Image: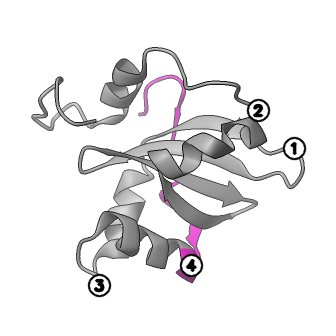
Amino acid sequence: MLPSGQRDYSSIRLTRHALERFHERFGGDAVDSESALRAALSRTRRLGRNADNGAVAVLAVYRGRALVAILQDVSCLTILTWPQFVPRLSEFGRTRVPRKWGRLLRRLVDPDLDLDPEGPI
């Protein structure tokens, strides 16, 4: 059971473009990129919705780095790093970065993992 405010998008359809962007931006083995992306999408937080096309931006954490997935209908269209997404915040109804950023990211990380709270996130 996920904590309040978190969503599981691990069963969403992943486009080839999304898998390629994930592999390009976050590295790892190309064969295991689908399972790694699905694991990251199992704990997400919604960032906002684009009113023009209905796309939804969700935040996840992969290997200690913030990952933003753009979802539309039942598909994951693309994967962005946080710096790539920041200029597009207003397209998804946000005027600024969410408050308490570090705490938000720590809540997305699996509590069983031993990560340094002062880490590079």
State the separation of the CA atoms marked 3 and 4: 15 Å
Residues in magenta? 1-17
| CB atoms of marks 2 and 1 within 8 Å | yes
The label number, if any, that marks residue 31 in the structure image: 3
Residue 100 figure quarter = top left
Quadrant the C terminus occupies:
top left
State the separation of the CA atoms marked 2 and 4: 24 Å
Looking at the rendered structure, the secondary structure element under dot 1 is loop
State the separation of the CA atoms marked 1 and 3: 35 Å
Observer-nearest residue: 112 or 105? 105
Q: Where 43 sits versus 53, above or below?
A: above
Mark with earlier residue (2, 4): 4
Q: Residue at x 34, y 69 (%)?
A: 35
**Majority SS type along the magenta span:** loop
Front of the two marks 3 and 4: 4
Mark with earlier residue (1, 4): 4
Left or right: 14 with respect to 111?
right
